[in-house]
Amino acid sequence: MKFVRYADGSAVRVGVVDGESVRVVEGATDLLPLIEAGELHDAGAAALRGGAAVALAGVVPLSPIATPPTVRDFYAFEQHVRAGRAWRGLEMEPDWYELPVFYFSNPYAVIGSGPVAMTPGADCFDFELEVAAVVGRGGHDLSAREADQLIAGYCVLNDWSGRDVQQREMKLSMGPVKGKDTATSLGPYFVTPEEIADFREGNGYRLEMTCSVNGVRYSRARWSDVYWSFGEMIAYASRGTEVRPGDVIGSGTCGTGCILELSRSHDAATYPWLKPGDEVIAAIEGLGELRNTVTKPAAVLPLRPRDAPRP
């Protein structure tokens, strides 16, 4: 099934895509309660049998889950990792092939299609094309096979990044922090695994991933290029702790999936940083297109006077 959460006037609704229509799931405003209760499939089936229909073309998708319990973002595509190390003159780190590392992102910053504000204080604003899995049932200390069976659905994910802010922060060895927590786009649909089962290949699916800026294609990859499977990522996330229904697991950027990689590997003039008014479309075959328009950032308020004494 392919679910969509969307605004209908002042109300928020959940529906199931049925051809060129959306069949409304009665009483639902978010997928998370349905996932937590194990009722997603039954609710979708009931909607397809008799739910009110609205035109799909008129729907503007919201994030399928308004506020996920957690968002973990991994680093699973080797081409992207290798390119990032190459321009810094570094070989691949052997531990990358042993540890599917991740960081925790900001669940309060998850959005769907629509406007996306730049990172405050950033001049180098970037998209990052990813695929996300959503956990459907809880578990801890899982095997990769067990973890794979917990996946409730997949979405397109765009991990917006203020690269200059990120670069300054990461000098302090604490991760990206404010460089990456202003916005994460998720959607436009929530696609259950059986919808794309026929495309399974390698550690992913034989589905094309693309991103364009103002109608010009920047990125192209395949989900099946991924080194770490979602089963492996979720299993690692569950090690010594637990994953819960609604947890979002991001794959990390695919090869060619961001301006930083493209500008360093090719030509910075051809791949300029994003600016207000730019339209970015992140798409994955079978999962849909996330459409966002970049807007101005919020003002940066000083934390203390610049001339304050230092110890």
Image (cartoon, rainbow, N blue to C red):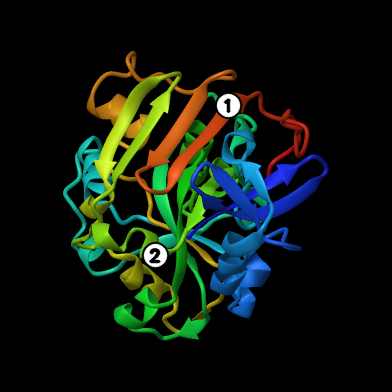
Q: Secondary structure at mark 1?
A: strand
The answer to whether 140 appears left or right of 13 in the picture is: left
- Give neighbour class at mark 1: few <14, some 14-19, many 20+ (Cα, 10 Å): some
Quarter location, residue 226 = bottom left
* In the rendered image, the vertical position of residue 126 relative to residue 208, given as above or below: above
* Residue under pointer 1: 293
* In the rendered image, the vertical position of residue 241 relative to residue 22, given as above or below: below
* First-in-chain label (1 vs 2): 2
Residue at 33%, 19% in the rendered image: 268
Q: Give the foreground label among 1 and 2.
A: 2
Q: Which mark is residue 157?
A: none
Q: Amino acid at mark 2?
A: Pro
The answer to whether 133 appears left or right of 31 in the picture is: left
Residue at 74%, 38% in the rendered image: 309
* Residue under pointer 2: 193
Task: Work out whether residue 51 can be spotted.
Answer: yes
Quarter location, residue 257 = top left
